Amino acid sequence: GEVHAMSVEEIELEIRKLDNQIRVFRSDMNTLNHGMRTMEEKVKQNKEKIKINSALPHLVGNVVEILDDEEESREDLAGSGMESSSSSSVAAGPRKTAVVKATTRQTVFLPVIGLVEPERLKPSELVSLNKDSFLILDMIPPEYDSRVKAMEVDEKPTESYDAIGGLDKQIKELIETVVMPMTRKADFDALSIKPPKGVLLYGAPGTGKTLMARACAAQTNACFLNSPDRNSCKCSLLTVRKSCV
C-alpha cells in the first residue's frame, strides 16, 4: 500500500538506499570472511608451533613457584584500551607466571607458562619442558621413575678415545653401533639399515665404561646423562645381562 502511494522519485530514492545497504552488507561480509581466513591461518600457524615445541626430546623439570604478574596484566589492559577500574581488573585477574628448574640445573622464569593450565600446576610438580624455550608442555605423573628423575645432564664431555687403552675392539663396535648411525644417518637411510636403539656397556668398576660413553657423547655432540643413583643403575644392568644370556 505504501509503495502505491509513493511517487516515482521516492521509489527511486528507496531503491538507491537499498542498493547502498546491500553494498554495506557485502563489504561487511567480505571483511568478516577476510578476518575468518586470517584467524584460520593463525590457528594453523599456532598448531605448527605447538607441534614443533612439543617435539621430542623433552627436559624433565620441577615447578619451583607460581607467580601472579599483576604489572603485566595492567599493561595488557592498558594496551587493549579496556577501562582500568577495579571491577575490570578483578574480572581479568593477574597473569600467571612460573619459575621452573630443569634437570640441566637451570632455573628459569617463564612469563608464558606453556601448554598446561596454571591452575593445574603446584610447586614441586614434575613437568615436561621444551628443550630450547623451557615452556611447560605436559605434566609428569607421580609414578614417574625415580631413577630417571635422578639423572642430570652433565657438563659437555671433552674426552676422546685416545685416553682409553686396551679397548680397541669395544671402541670400534661402539663407533659402528652408535656413532655412525648418528653422524651418517643419510647413508643408513639410503641403505635401509635400521640401527640398534642403544648399547649396553657392562663390566667391573674402572674398566672404562663411563669414559667410553663420555668419548662417544663428545664425538656425536650429544648430551651425557649422569645418574647419582649408582645402586639402582647397577641393578638394572644386572637384570639386562641376565635376560640377554
Image (cartoon, rainbow, N blue to C red):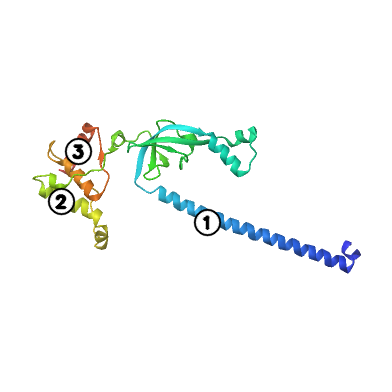
Residue most toward the left?
166
Q: Amino acid at mark 1?
A: Glu
**Which of 139 and 162 lies nearest the eye of the viewer?**
162
Q: Quarter holding the C terminus?
A: top left
Q: Which residue is mark 2?
A: 173
Marker disc for residue 234: none
Q: Quarter holding the N terminus?
A: bottom right
**Which residue is at 45% across, 35% downward?**
98
**Which residue is at 83% across, 65% downward?**
13
Residue 156 left/right relative to 117:
left
Q: Residue 129 occupies which quadrant of the picture?
A: top left
Sort mark 3 into few (<14), some (14-19) or many (20+) by Cα contacts within 10 Å: some
Q: Which residue is mark 3?
A: 237
Q: Earlier in the sequence, mark 3 or mark 1?
A: 1
Residue 223 in the image, given as x and y percentages of width and height: 27, 44
Sort mark 1 into few (<14), some (14-19) or many (20+) by Cα contacts within 10 Å: few
Residue 219 in the image, given as x and y percentages of width and height: 21, 49
Q: Amino acid at mark 3?
A: Leu
Q: Which residue is mark 1?
A: 41
Q: Are marks 3 and 1 in contact (CB under 8 Å)?
A: no
**Which of 232 and 220 lies nearest the eye of the viewer?**
220
Q: Amino acid at mark 2?
A: Glu
| Helix, strand or loop under label 1 | helix
Rounded to the nearest angstrom, the CA distance separating label 1 from label 2 is: 50 Å
Image height of 20 relative to 129, above or below: below
Rounded to the nearest angstrom, the CA distance separating label 3 from label 1 is: 50 Å
Image height of 58 relative to 6, above or below: above
**Which of 108 and 38 lies nearest the eye of the viewer?**
108
Q: Earlier in the sequence, mark 3 or mark 2?
A: 2
Sort mark 2 into few (<14), some (14-19) or many (20+) by Cα contacts within 10 Å: few
